[in-house]
Image: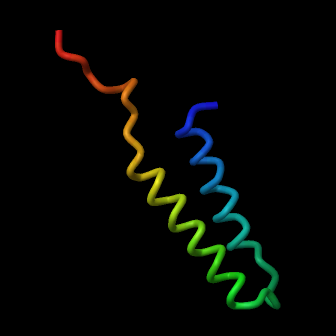
Amino acid sequence: MSKREALERAVAIARERIDNAPADTPQDVLDTWKTEYDMLSLDLNNLYDYDDMEQPE
């Protein structure tokens, strides 16, 4: 699994956890999950795929 695929999966899992959290989930836990989601999303958005980069001939 590539780094991009791993990050995409982690972001999807984090988003699902937030979206499907029980109503009685403590706010500090939700805040931690949202912070984790934000950090993973940022890592994914800043990921640069060197394999896709066009190489000069």
Of 35 and 17, the residue lying toward us: 35
Q: Does 53 sit left or right of 28 as displayed?
A: left
Q: In percent of the image, x 36 and y 26: which residue is there?
A: 52
Image coordinates of residue 20 in percent, x first then y, are 76, 72
- Looking at the rendered structure, the number of numbered marks drawn on it comes to 0
Query: Relative to residue 7, is residue 27 depicted above or below?
Result: below
Of 31 and 20, the residue lying toward us: 31
Q: For the C terminus, give its image quadrant.
A: top left
Image coordinates of residue 6 in percent, x first then y, are 62, 42
Q: In percent of the image, x 70 and y 58: which residue is there?
A: 13
Image coordinates of residue 54 in percent, x first then y, are 26, 21
* Residue at the farthest left position: 57
Which quadrant would residue 22 be assigned to in this image?
bottom right
Q: How is the image coloured?
A: rainbow
Q: Does 53 sit left or right of 3 as displayed?
A: left
Query: Relative to residue 16, is residue 35 depicted above or below?
Result: below
Which quadrant would residue 55 be assigned to in this image?
top left
Query: Relative to residue 15, is residue 55 depicted above or below?
Result: above
Query: Relative to residue 15, is residue 26 depicted above or below?
Result: below
Q: For the N terminus, give its image quadrant.
A: top right
Q: Does 39 sit left or right of 46 as displayed?
A: right
* Residue at the farthest top position: 57
Q: Does 30 sit left or right of 51 as displayed?
A: right
Image coordinates of residue 51 in percent, x first then y, are 39, 24
